[in-house]
Amino acid sequence: MRERVRQRERERGPGPRAGYELCFERRQTFVERQYQGKVVVWPHEREWDVSRQGKIMWFLHPGAYKDTCLQDWYVFVQEIPKVSGKHRHQGGLVIFALEGEGTTTMDEVPHHWEAGDLLILPVKEGGVVHQHFNRRQDGQSSFWLAFINDFIWDHVGSEMEQLELSPLWLEQQGEARGR
């Protein structure tokens, strides 16, 4: 006589969250942050960072800060003691000069600026090669504030290539190796 084999089937539990549910949750989180995120960002809440492009303080950064109501902007101050790094990206960046005076080269064309001026890096196929120079005669740094929208950054196919490193970055890297 043949034995009868019984198999027990489990009820299917909840599977991985599906695309729609993830979309719905992401939207809810986005809206909640719009209502509850901070609307004032104080400089003492952020830190200066020495990067290959120079000394930068990020006020808004979609990947780094999740505490503000505005979620899709990069906003940062850059200090320019003498010269920044040099890089290329598709543009779409707005720079407001806060203090001092300088020159920004865009595709090797110099553009002079001083506190209160607005520079606009155009969106351009192949990108815009740019670098920033301090022209102050008193030995003090110049400062500017930059704005770039994440939508523009992501959707124009922006890439970024570092062409020259910031002297501050090179100095910091040398000190790190010397320890």
Image (cartoon, grey):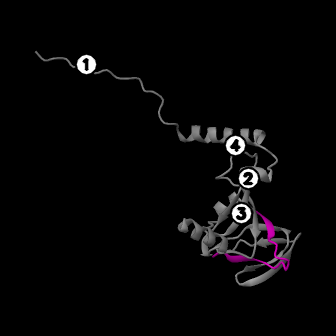
The reply to whether discs 1 and 3 touch (Cβ–Cβ < 8 Å) is: no
Q: Residues within 10 Å of mark 3 (few under 14, many from 20)?
A: some
Q: How far apart in space, not on screen, are marks 4 and 1 (Cα)? A: 49 Å
Residue 84 is a magenta residue:
no
Residue type (three-letter) at the residue carrying disc 2: Arg
Q: Which residue is mark 4?
A: 30
The reply to whether discs 3 and 4 touch (Cβ–Cβ < 8 Å) is: no
> Which residue does the image show at 60% across and 72% down from the upper left?
161
Q: Which residue is mark 3?
A: 56
Q: How far apart in space, not on screen, are marks 3 and 4 (Cα)? A: 27 Å
Q: Residues within 10 Å of mark 2 (few under 14, many from 20)?
A: few
Drawn side of residue 154 relative to residue 17, left or right: right
Q: How far apart in space, not on screen, are marks 2 and 1 (Cα)? A: 64 Å
> Which residue does the image show at 63% across and 71% down from the upper left?
171
Residue type (three-letter) at the residue carrying disc 1: Arg
Closer to us: mark 4 or mark 1? 4
Residue type (three-letter) at the residue carrying disc 3: Ile
The mark nearer the N terminus, 3 or 4, is: 4
